[in-house]
Amino acid sequence: DRETFYARFHTAKLAGVVAGQDHTNVATVNGQGLNTGTKVSDSDPYNAKVRAAAPAVSIVKKDAAGNDANLPSEAVNLSKTGGVTSIVLTVTNVGSEGIVNLSVADSTTAGSGVVRDLVCTFPDGKKGLTWAGELAVGASFTCQGVLADVVANKPHTNVSTVNGEGVYSGEKVTDSDSYNAKVVGLPSTGASVLGIMTVAFALLLIGAVMTRRRSVREV
């Protein structure tokens, strides 16, 4: 005798698995033999889990020479370049969830310098300072700008910031990185200039007195 086997496939969608909780569901089929009436049954479990959302983002800012200069004590001397340098920002998804609604900004917190023409190139080729995303886990993009107008004797600090949110959790994420620079030059304060003028006047006065004494002696 030849036996014939029949199979039917059914599909379903699993939803509502909560982050941080283990999930198990069991599919069961019941029936009975067509001729014998014998009851039959079978089951098969399925297990799943969703890792707890942990979105995180990182931003790192360096200059054209690769200087990080996070602290004022690490300020880069821009005297030879006239207080100008290019700036590169690298934004990376360092969490376990994709990030959306990203924005990048830079602000000066000390000194007179400012970052100009800042623009980011996102993974899909778009450019700007805001991006809908998604920035995948481990992915990154860069932004470039020019720091200018750093002047003598006014230490400069600017801070770059990135903001976003987890694609599933909606959790807000942010990170910042600072860059410090300086230009070394002659004193420019009023007190310093007055001091120099006072010394010069004193030298002129001493010269005049010595000249008068020499004239008196000759007479």
Image (cartoon, rainbow, N blue to C red):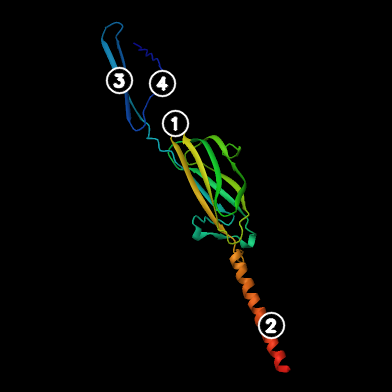
> Answer yes or no: do the residues labelled 1 and 3 have beta carbons within 8 Å?
no
Disc 4 marks a residue whose amino acid type is: Lys
Q: Return the x and y of residue 215 as percentages of the image width and height.
A: 72, 90
Q: Which mark's residue is nearer the viewer, 4 or 3?
A: 4
Identify the residue position indicated by label 3 in the image.
43
Instruction: In this rendered view, identify the residue nearer to me: 28 or 204.
Output: 204
Residue 199 vs 12, above or below: the answer is below
Query: How much space separates mark 2 and mark 4, taking CA atoms?
Result: 102 Å
Q: Return the x and y of residue 27 as percentages of the image width and height.
A: 33, 19
Query: How much space separates mark 3 and mark 2, taking CA atoms?
Result: 114 Å
Of the numbered discs 4 and 3, the one sitting upstream in the chain is 4
Instruction: In this rendered view, identify the residue nearer to me: 208 or 47.
Output: 208
> Answer yes or no: do the residues labelled 2 and 1 have beta carbons within 8 Å?
no
Identify the residue position indicated by label 1 in the image.
168
Disc 3 marks a residue whose amino acid type is: Ser
Element assignment for label 2: helix
Q: Which residue is drawn at 63% across and 77% down?
A: 202
Q: Return the x and y of residue 86 as percentages of the image width and height.
A: 61, 52
Q: Residues within 10 Å of mark 3 (few under 14, many from 20)?
A: few
Of the numbered discs 3 and 2, the one sitting upstream in the chain is 3
Query: How much space separates mark 1 and mark 3, taking CA atoms?
Result: 32 Å
Identify the residue position indicated by label 2 in the image.
208
Of the numbered discs 4 and 1, the one sitting upstream in the chain is 4
Query: How much space separates mark 2 and mark 1, taking CA atoms?
Result: 84 Å
Q: Residue at x 67, y 86 (%)?
A: 210
Query: Which image quadrant for residue 150?
Result: bottom right
Residue 157 vs 139, above or below: the answer is below
Identify the residue position indicated by label 4 in the image.
13
